[in-house]
Amino acid sequence: MNILDNHIHSHFSMDSKEDMENIIKRAINLGVKHLTFTDHLEYEDNKFTLDLNKYVESIYKYKEKYKKDINLLTGIEIGYESNIKNEIEDIINKYPFDFVLCSTHSINSKKIYKDDFFKGLSQKESYNKYYQSIIDTTKEFKNFDIYGHLDYIIRYGNYETKALYDDYKDIIDEVLKSIISIGKGIEINTSGYRYNLDNVHPSIDVLKRYKELGGEILTIGSDAHKAVDICSGFDKAYEILDYLGFKYVCLFENRKCKFIKVEKDIIHSA
C-alpha cells in the first residue's frame, strides 16, 4: 500500500498542467491514504504565482467530495528568497496549511534551473553558494516544516560530474545541523530517478549523515507534476530507509508532525 505522498503538484503550479481531480483519482486507485498538495508559491514579475484562494478552495472541495476514500491535505512549496520573507510569512499565517515545504529554487533572483545562476562560478563556487543560502535561510526563516530536495542543485549546471557528499561534506553537515537545530526536517524526494540521477534527493550519503546527526523528521514525496508519477520510486525509497535504519516517515496535519511506522506492507511501487 502506498500510504502517503507528501509532495504533489497540480495545474495550480506554473510547471504542471495536471488537473487536481485526476491526481486524486489516481492516488485513490493506488491505495494512497494521505495525499498532500504542495503547489509552488514562487515570486516572479513582482507577484506570486499561486492563486491561493482558488487553490485552497479546490482542495477543500475535493477533500469533502472524497473524504471516504482519501485524506487530502493542504500544503505549499515555498520558493524562499530573503527579500520576500515578510510577504511569505503573511501568506503562511493567513491560510490553513497543513504542511509547509521550504525549497531553494532561486538565489538573489537568479534561478538555479537556468544557466544565469551558474555564470561566472565554478562548480565548487556554485554548490557552496547554494548550500550556504540554505544555512542562511534557516537562520532567518523558521515558519516551515520540511526543507525540500536538499541537493536539488545537482540537477543543473551541465557539469560532467555530479557532486558527491564527500566533496561538500563540511558545508552539507552544517546545512543538516542547522535544520535539525531548529526542529525541522528534510524530505526523501524520489524525483531524482525521473531526472536520470539514479538516486533520491538528497542522496543516500546525505540521508545517512542526517540520521547520524540525530535527524528524525523525514517525509517522503514523489514531487509529481503528473498524475502518473504519484508515488513513483517509492519502492526504492523505502528500501533506502530500511537500509539506513529509519523506522518512521512523517505526515503533517495542521502543521503538526505525525510519525508513521514504516511497515513492510507499505513498501510498494506505483
Image (cartoon, rainbow, N blue to C red):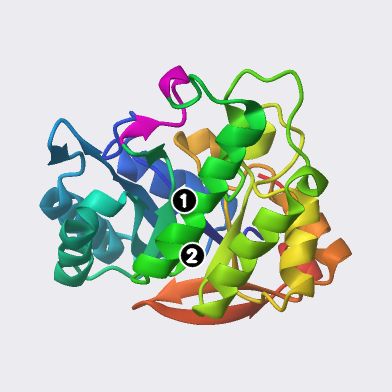
Q: Between 79 and 31, which is closer to the camera in this rendering?
A: 79
Give the residue at x 69% y 50%: 234
* Residue for badge 1: 133
> Horizontal and vertical percent for residue 216?
66, 77
> Horizontal and vertical percent for residue 122?
62, 25
Q: Is residue 267 visible?
A: no
Q: Judge depth for marks 2 and 1 and give the one in front.
A: 1
Q: In what quadrant of the picture does the N terminus appear? A: bottom right
Mark closest to the chain's N terminus, 2 or 1: 1
Q: Is residue 65 visible?
A: yes
Magenta stretch: give its range: 109-116
Give the residue at x 60% y 30%: 155
Give the residue at x 41% y 43%: 23
Q: Secondary structure at mark 1?
A: helix
> Horizontal and vertical percent for residue 244?
84, 65
Q: Amino acid at mark 2?
A: Ile
The 10 Å Cα crowd at callout 1, few under 14, some 14 to 19, many 20 or more, is: many
Q: Residue furthest right?
A: 243
